[in-house]
Amino acid sequence: MTRNMDRRLQTLAEWLHDSEYPVFFTGAGLSTDSGLPDFRGPDGVWTRRDKGLPPRPGGVPWDRVDPNAGHFALFELQRLGRLKFLISQNVDNLHLKSGIEPKRLAELHGNVARLRCRRCETTFDKADPPERCDCGGELTSSVVDFGMSLPVKDLDRSLRHARQSDLFVVIGSSLVVTPAAHMPAEAYQAGARLVIVNQQETPLDPYARLRFHEPIGEVLPAVVERLKKIMVELP
């Protein structure tokens, strides 16, 4: 570990300790260590498509994918009271599998394991859904395809929490898919410290107070361990 990285890890841990409203934002890069592809990385889904290459062979079925160290680090931050809200672009269900509380999570692009009511936007486990929602609405896939609108309730919740945050941490997102990618800008404009953990460049890099290009699995668990030490020394 370089001295520069050590300093950045310590700074983020201290900011998390002092933050009153830490909000996190995750993209596909968080789930690559679980065996899922990202989209804009060097071998990502859209990168391969733009190069005229076929989809990457093999891969793990979505329902057999498990959370990785990055997901569990976020769960640990929730347990420590240092995760006020989590906004995700991911549809892989790994945040819920890791133990993130549904009330603290907005899945802006849906979830492959859940259905959504067309009328009131309540979601249900796809494994055991009712025939219709209690409101009478029809159930359909919660995954948001290109050209579809984001779920209004989750979008509103995300905007509200982003604007209330004093620390906003982006993890594994290229920040090019809108309107989800507007959330960090909303937080920054409202005065939050912006931190970005992503190996590729993003449009908001110039505004980040801390920038990590290192792998997520090397950053988040290390930050959590440093935070725990600070909490013991300075409860």
Image (cartoon, rainbow, N blue to C red):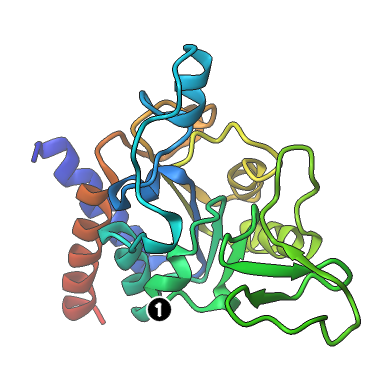
Compared to 80, does 224 lie above or below? Answer: above
Q: Residues within 10 Å of mark 1 (few under 14, many from 20)?
A: some
Residue ID at (18%, 66%): 225
Is 128 left, or right, of 21 in this rendering? right
Picture quarter with the N terminus: top left
Q: Tell me where residue 57 sits by quadrant.
A: top left
Compare residues 217 and 36 and report the one nearer the observer.
Answer: 36
Is 151 left, or right, of 172 in this rendering? right
Residue 206 spot, x, y in % from top left: 48, 27
- Which amino acid type is marked by label 1? Gly
Is 178 left, or right, of 97 in this rendering? right
Residue 7 spot, x, y in % from top left: 18, 45
Q: Is residue 195 visible?
A: no
Query: Would you name the residue on which mark 1 appears?
Result: 81
Q: Tell me where residue 64 sits by quadrant.
A: bottom left
Residue 120 spot, x, y in % from top left: 85, 73
Classify mark 1: helix, strand or loop: loop
Residue ID at (52%, 67%): 21
Residue 182 spot, x, y in % from top left: 66, 42
Compared to 45, does 144 lie above or below? Answer: below
Compare residues 63 and 194 and report the one nearer the observer.
Answer: 63
Residue ID at (38%, 30%): 56
Compared to 91, does 148 lie above or below? Answer: above
Q: Tell me where residue 133 sits by quadrant.
A: bottom right
